[in-house]
Image: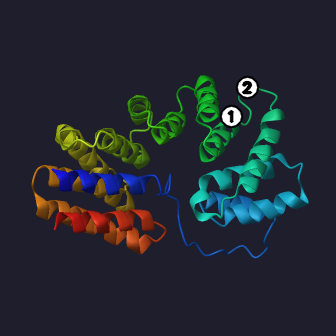
Amino acid sequence: MIILRCTLFVLLLALSCSVKDSFAKNMTDSVQQVGTEASCTRLYSDNSPDAYRHCYKALQKAPGNLALNYYTAASLALFAPDIDLTKANLLAAISSINQVISKRKLPTDWVDSFMVRAMLYDLQGDFKSALKDMDKCIAIDPKYGVYYRKRARVLLNYGKNDLAMKDLIVAKGLEPREPQVLRLILETLFKEYSSEGSPTKVCGNCEKLFKYYDELYKMEGSTEWNQSYGLYFRGPCWACLNDKSKAEADLIKARSVFKQSGGHEPLVGAIDKALQLMH
């Protein structure tokens, strides 16, 4: 029981250091002109961490361009794990998105700006402001699943697991084919039982965790990375059920994918510690 509790702790701790959402990494920058609006929007649409650098430079040339203000702030929010995030550039991004929000003429204009600002507030540690902005998004468009998913992430970051799960169930109904929803459900279940440090609670949630992992695995378009993220959570359940070989197999496979994709050192390190504890 002590070993299982320690295993859960190291895996849980790594989640707070890992990326909030996975985006494409190590993409080749095919845009020759750095700091143009075209390079900014192109790299942003390609989910490249280089987008922030291009958008920021383009914004310096045209500080009044609303689109550049939006994409600069959004790229910082989305790719924060890949950027040398400082208090100064975080405040600058919030200022940029505030410009966009202040120029809204209709309730439906630039709605995603509130979501971007919420993500920036979340990075800043301002939970109340982040939640307030996500509430605005949902009030404007209550049928858009992404908003529930993003609000769930904010709630999850601040330990509001029960409220996060409610939002994720709604998001799942609105986005039935979105792997990120299932990933967040798995993470929420994991944090729910790990936060209590109770192996008994783990066993009680294993059936749900297995169910959602199977759904994620079978989902059309689910990548190997998404599936491995699920294995990261399924492994401890096997350990709880005293099946050490299956627990190790899940964690080793997840580790291999995280290692190859790069940028997931906290998760790799946590798996290494968990595997050591099992021996």
Query: Looking at the picture, which amino acid does disc 2 mark?
Result: Pro
Q: Is residue 126 left or right of residue 89?
A: left
Q: Is residue 198 left or right of residue 102?
A: left
Looking at the picture, the colour scheme in use is: rainbow
Closest to the observer, 234 or 276: 276
Instruction: Return the x and y of residue 100 as percentages of the image width and height.
Output: 79, 40
Assign a secondary structure to mark 1: loop
Quarter of the rendering occupied by the C terminus: bottom left
Q: Residues within 10 Å of mark 1 (few under 14, many from 20)?
A: some
Q: Quadrant of residue 118?
A: top right
Instruction: Return the x and y of residue 186 as percentages of the image width and height.
Output: 33, 45
Q: Quadrant of residue 222?
A: bottom left
Instruction: Return the x and y of residue 153 as percentages of the image width and height.
Output: 49, 41
Closest to the observer, 266 or 259: 266
Closest to the observer, 139 or 255: 255
Q: Quadrant of residue 266?
A: bottom left
Q: Which residue is mark 1?
A: 111
Instruction: Return the x and y of residue 149 as percentages of the image width and height.
Output: 48, 38
Residue name at image x 82 percent, y 46 percent: 66
Alpha carbon of mark 1 to alpha carbon of mark 2: how far? 7 Å
Q: Is residue 27 left or right of residue 242?
A: right
Disc number for residue 127: none
Q: Residue furthest top?
A: 139
Residue name at image x 68 percent, y 50 percent: 74
Q: Residues within 10 Å of mark 2 (few under 14, many from 20)?
A: few
Q: Which residue is mark 2?
A: 107
Mark 1 and 2 residues: CB-CB less than 8 Å, in contact? yes
Assign a secondary structure to mark 2: loop
Q: Confirm whether residue 164 shows in the render.
A: yes
Query: Looking at the picture, which amino acid does disc 1 mark?
Result: Val
